[in-house]
Image: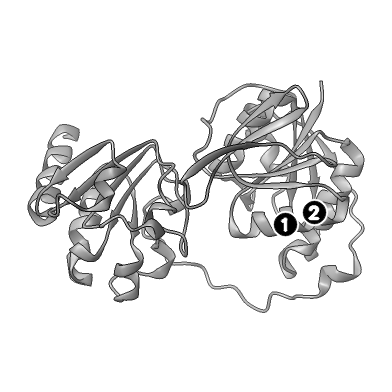
């Protein structure tokens, strides 16, 4: 069976959820071979094996931590030479898409970004994308070289399937560009205790209708009751009510959770582009004509300051 390279997103050996989703997709079309780089790379093998990785190519070198992007591209290029895969799957983060694009140029292949599904076709792998601000769904395949595909988080379930997960050392020769951009310092992001926005199964977002930074406590309370991440529209972020890191939309982050709750968000195309692929969408807005209602699975016409606290209370009571 053909092999599929999966680029592992991990922090000191702790594998992040999007990588496990990629292993699920990789098993649909071949045998997953994981590529883990940096500190703790070898420690990822146990988890990767539990989710279907037949091999784990591991490499650790100071370059992966001290310099941006290019050392990882060098390593993936080396892995492609070792494995000769039918595809390379990469998590669709900002860094992941840059790594994938550089790799595609290096190996002379086509690239597909922000895929939401993957299947084997008669003429090669076929990826499903949501494009043009989520107005269309397309099915595409790479017609030249090894398919390089970035996949959005929450596009596939995490499935535990045991495999060998044999660890092999990946020999990497770093290119001249590898040390071109050096990391001078790092500052850990303050944790809120909530899930990462792009990886969360549930997202609760607030918009212009929240009407102030202090009122986002209502949104946060509902999110915490559901174990959800908190998002915000561009209007809320531009007003300074919530950090830009939580913005959902075309100029923010793209999310695809199982459940998306939009509170006080009108539903401009800019926002819809970042959340339209969510599996179930619920909107709360006092304007019955708001464009968001054209998109949702469930809509509540009402004042969010009345509806959201009641919903939070109901969720909390049922959990209790």
Work out how far the residue at label 2 is from the one at label 1, CA to CA, in angstroms: 6 Å
User: Residue at image x 40%, y 41%?
Assistant: 278
Check disc 2 and report the residue beneath it.
Answer: 103
Residue 62, given in percent of the width and then of the height, sits at 79, 64
Vertical order, 32 against 145 (above or below): above
Residue 187 vs residue 183: left or right? left
Quadrant the C terminus occupies: top left
Instruction: Give the camera-side residue of 191 and 91.
Output: 91
Q: Quadrant of residue 74?
A: bottom right
Check disc 1 and report the residue beneath it.
Answer: 99
- Residue 248 in view in this figure: no
User: Residue at image x 46%, y 60%?
Assistant: 250
Tag 2–tag 1 contact (CB < 8 Å): yes
Residue 252, given in percent of the width and then of the height, sits at 46, 63
User: Residue at image x 14%, y 49%?
Assistant: 288
Instruction: Give the camera-side residue of 244 and 64.
Output: 244
Residue 55, given in percent of the width and then of the height, sits at 78, 32
Residue that extends furthest to the left in the rendered view of this protein: 306
């Amino acid at each position: 069976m053909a092999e599929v390279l999966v680029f592992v997103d991990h922090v000191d050996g702790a594998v992040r959820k999007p990588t496990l989703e990629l292993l699920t997709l990789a098993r649909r079309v071949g045998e997953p071979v994981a590529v883990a780089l940096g500190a703790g790379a070898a420690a990822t093998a146990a988890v990767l094996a539990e989710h279907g990785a037949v091999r784990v190519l591991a490499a650790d070198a100071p370059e992966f931590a001290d310099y941006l992007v290019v050392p990882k591209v060098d390593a993936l290029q080396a892995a492609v030479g070792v494995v000769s895969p039918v595809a390379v799957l990469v998590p669709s983060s900002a860094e992941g898409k840059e790594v994938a694009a550089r790799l595609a140029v290096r190996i002379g292949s086509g690239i597909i970004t922000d895929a939401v599904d993957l299947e084997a076709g008669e003429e090669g792998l076929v990826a499903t994308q949501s494009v043009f601000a989520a107005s269309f769904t397309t099915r595409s395949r790479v017609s030249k070289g090894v398919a390089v595909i970035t996949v959005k988080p929450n596009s596939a379930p995490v499935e535990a399937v045991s495999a060998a997960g044999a660890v092999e050392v990946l020999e990497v020769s770093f290119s001249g560009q590898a040390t071109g951009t050096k990391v001078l310092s790092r500052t850990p992001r303050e944790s809120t205790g909530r899930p990462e926005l792009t990886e969360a199964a549930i997202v609760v977002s607030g918009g212009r209708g929240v009407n102030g930074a202090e009122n986002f406590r209502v949104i946060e309370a509902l999110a915490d009751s559901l174990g959800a991440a908190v998002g915000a529209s561009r209007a809320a972020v531009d007003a300074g009510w919530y950090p830009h890191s939580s913005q959902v939309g075309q100029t923010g982050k793209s999310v695809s959770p199982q459940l998306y709750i939009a509170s006080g968000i009108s539903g401009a195309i800019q926002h819809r582009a970042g959340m339209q692929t969510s599996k179930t969408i619920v909107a709360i807005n006092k304007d019955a004509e708001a464009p968001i209602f054209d998109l949702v699975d469930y809509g509540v016409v009402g004042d969010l300051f009345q509806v959201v606290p009641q919903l939070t209370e109901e969720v909390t009571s049922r959990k209790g």
